[in-house]
């Protein structure tokens, strides 16, 4: 089964947006995990599968080590992260999560807009 050109194009756009997003998260929060170890990856605080509109929001990215990634969804880790980043960060991000744009769709057009937004930072 061949992948359609449209699917390939979308994958390239997502990859480009992800790379820009990861760089922006590192620029904002550094390359260390909240525990102080070197980061392994950038974790989405709100899952991109459920909160697609937050996929490329910098505040939704958390540089994280492998050990912390295992615990990333635990209430203790979430409380630790809230203490580290602050209650305002948590409330602002929660507000964004609970109020997605009307008729949000992760379309190629939206991804291109996110790419441009991230480039303009």
Image: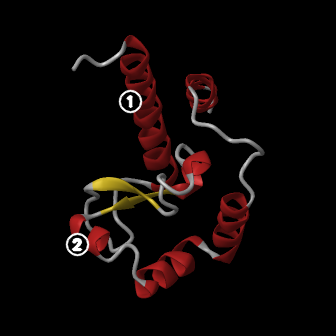
Q: Position of residue 93 (x, y in %)?
A: 65, 62
- At horizontal 52% and vertical 57% (from top left) the residue drawn is 50
Please state the total of marks drawn on the protein image.
2
Residue located farthest toward the front when viewing the structure as drawn? 1
Write down the residue under mark 1: 15
Q: What coloring was used for the rendering?
A: secondary structure
Query: Which quarter of the rendering shows the C terminus?
Result: top right
- Quarter-of-image position of residue 19: top left
Q: Residue furthest bottom?
A: 76
Q: Position of residue 58 (x, y in %)?
A: 56, 49
Q: Where 72 sits versus 74, above or below?
A: above
The residue at which mark 2 appears reads as 67
Q: Earlier in the sequence, mark 2 or mark 1?
A: 1
Q: Give the mark toward the camera: 2 or 1.
A: 1
Q: Residue at x 48, y 39 (%)?
A: 21
Q: 41 left or right of 78? A: left
Q: Which label belongs to residue 110?
A: none
Which corner quadrant holds the N terminus?
Answer: top left
Q: Nearer the viewer, residue 63 or 10?
A: 10
Q: Secondary structure at mark 1?
A: helix
At 52% from the left edge and 46% from the top edge, which residue is drawn? 55
* Residue in the foreground of this view, choosing between 34 and 116: 116
Q: Is residue 58 above or below residue 91?
A: above
Q: Is residue 72 left or right of residue 112?
A: left
The reply to whether callout 2 and callout 1 are in contact (CB within 8 Å) is no
């Amino acid at each position: 089964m061949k992948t359609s050109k449209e699917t390939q194009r979308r994958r390239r756009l997502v990859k480009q947006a992800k790379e820009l997003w990861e760089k922006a998260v590192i620029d904002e929060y550094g390359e260390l995990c909240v525990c102080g170890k070197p980061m392994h990856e950038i974790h989405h605080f709100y899952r991109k599968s459920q909160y697609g509109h937050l996929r490329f929001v910098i505040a939704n990215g958390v540089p994280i080590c492998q050990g912390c990634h295992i615990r990333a969804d635990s209430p203790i880790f979430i409380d630790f992260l809230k203490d580290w980043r602050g209650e305002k960060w948590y409330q602002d991000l929660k507000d964004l999560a609970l109020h997605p744009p009307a008729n949000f769709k992760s379309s190629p057009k939206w991804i291109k807009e996110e790419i441009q937004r991230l480039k303009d930072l």
